[in-house]
Image: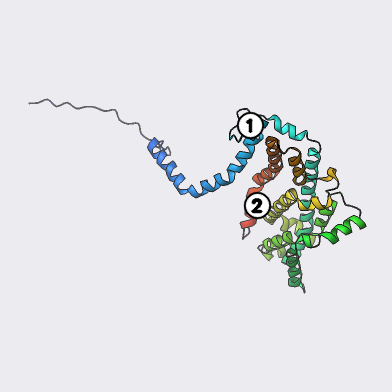
Amino acid sequence: MTATTTTLTAPSAPVRPGTRRSPAPAARRRAALHWIAVHTVAIAAALFFLLPFVFVFLTAVMSDSQAMSGALWPTEWHWSNYAEVFRTPGFLDWWRNSLMYAVLGTLFTLCSSIPVAYALAKFRFRGRRTAMLLVISTMMLPPQVVVVPMYLVWAQQFHLSGSLWPLIIPMAFGDAYSIFLLRQFLLTIPKEYLESARVDGCGEFRTLLRIIVPMAKPGIAAVALFQFFYCWNDYFGPQIYAAQNPGAWTLSYGLESFKSAHSVNWNLTMAATLLVMAPVIIVFFFAQKAFVEGVTLTGVKG
């Protein structure tokens, strides 16, 4: 008879319910490759738009000699370039003027456009469609067509040439594009909300503030972002009204003067360019969720 030996193996530890075993390295690699393959086009597009910003940032922290050499990576990081830009005479004034222009212009546009959009979207009156067509027709008129008579009015009648007020004050009387966007968004709000508010004794102004504005926050955020970007990047308006007064220049217009004064200092020019773009990028980063909702939302949350 032959003796048979049995090998005893220790029982494996039981797997507790709700716990997952970590995937093997090969499985993780396959998952990563699959994700890259699926998002190839998105990754390529992201790199296409991101690389110019990376180039501007890297050039901004180079020395003068290295920025002119065509190098792609700085050998020494000169963070003092940003301080040098702020020490440029007038740069802080340009920053303050741009901030005032963008903030006041956005606030004036919202305060004047929201009531008009509310009236065109929810009121029933004779000539409502004609009024909407007139608003849309003003969008087809280029601002360059009326720039000469408008400049004469602001310069000769109100004596405001050399300042940004001729650009800020008209925004208190509404903006056609903002009115159109807000009106289209307000049309998606069911009229039952307004009828309930009127039954409870709310007037039109209180209904606008308590019902319409909270429900239209995504649309208002989208309009505010569009208007802020327009004012911050506006070059044509400051060139017409504030060119003769360097104390009223904005960043978009002053950057041209900065570039001419530092034509051989590409590192300082790139640093100034990055400082001009930074507020727009920061505002969009924090408001992108509301912006996307305002552009794509077609219904109302209950």
Q: CA distance from mark 2 to mark 1?
A: 40 Å
Look at 52% across and 48% down and name the residue there. 42
Look at 68% across and 63% down and name the residue there. 184
**Mark nearer the viewer, 2 or 1:** 1
The location of residue 116, given as percent across then percent down, is 77, 62
Q: Tell me the residue that label 1 is attached to.
A: 66
Classify mark 2: helix, strand or loop: helix
Q: Which quadrant would the N terminus be assigned to in this image?
A: top left
Residue type pointed to by label 1? Gln
Q: Quadrant of residue 207?
A: bottom right
Q: Tell me the residue that label 2 is attached to.
A: 291
Look at 85% across and 61% down and name the residue there. 149
Foreground residue among 19 and 118: 118
Total numbered badges shown on the rendered structure: 2
The location of residue 3, given as percent across then percent down, is 12, 25
Foreground residue among 271 and 256: 256
The location of residue 224, given as percent across then percent down, is 72, 52
Q: Which quadrant would the C terminus be assigned to in this image?
A: bottom right
Q: Is residue 301 visible?
A: no
